[in-house]
Amino acid sequence: MPIYWGDYRGDTGHLSTVQHGAYLLLIGHYWAHGSLPDDDQQLANIARLSLEDWLIHRPIIHAFFYDGWKHKRIERELKRHTEVYAKRLAASEKGVMVRAMNRYRNRN
């Protein structure tokens, strides 16, 4: 997952160390799994916080998300990543077919 440190620092300068850690763990989980659960205990576990600590920091961290736990930047990056992967896969499949056709032609 790409992280744009200038943007990150500009958006998160007000976070405490604990909030930075929780936020980074949440966005890492989001990237790996495509979403976050809408459950405080699960979010606390992902953020490696007790439920009590999570509930203290939740409002500040939640401000980076919309519609529950969607994240604009990660959604955009996931879409871009999927599109790039699909293009590379198509190019790879085309390359395999071209090589197979060339081998067939060279045998005959």
Image (cartoon, rainbow, N blue to C red):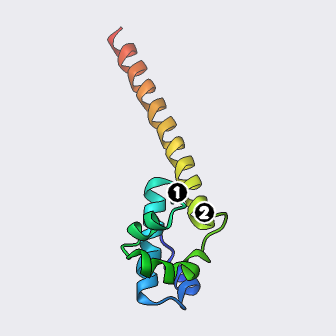
| Quarter placement of the C terminus | top left
Q: Residue visible at 44% across and 24% down?
A: 97
Question: Mark 2 vs mark 1: which is more N-terminal?
Answer: 1
| Number of the label disc, if any, that sits on residue 101 | none
Between marks 2 and 1, how big is the CA–CA gap?
7 Å
Q: Position of residue 2 (x, y in %)?
A: 47, 66
Relative side of 101 to 65, left or right: left
**Is 2 in front, or is 92?**
2
Indicate which disc residue 35 carries.
Answer: 1
Query: Residue 52: x, y in percent?
Result: 43, 79
Which quadrant of the figure has residue 68?
bottom right
Bin the neighbour count of mark 2 within 10 Å (Cα to Cα): few under 14, some 14-19, many 20 and up: some
Work out which quarter of the rendered image holds the N terminus and state it: bottom left
**Badge 1: few (under 14), some or many (20 or more) residues near its Cα, within 10 Å?**
some
Identify the residue shown where x is 56% and y is 63%: 74
* Residue closest to the far front: 52
Asked where in the image residue 7 lies, by quadrant, the reply is bottom right
Residue closest to the eye, 83 or 99: 83
Q: Secondary structure at mark 2?
A: loop
Q: Nearer the viewer, residue 5 or 28?
A: 28
2 and 1 marks in contact (CB < 8 Å): yes
Residue at 46% in and 31% down: 93
Q: Position of residue 83 (x, y in %)?
A: 57, 47
Residue 64 in which image quadrant: bottom right
Q: Residue furthest left?
A: 107
Instruction: Identify the residue position indicated by label 2 in the image.
Output: 70
Residue situated in front as seen by the camera: 67 or 91: 67
In the rendered image, the vertical position of residue 10 relative to residue 32, given as above or below:
below
At label 2, the amino acid type is Lys
**Residue 92 position in % (x across, y down):** 44, 36
Residue 3 position (above or below residue 33): below
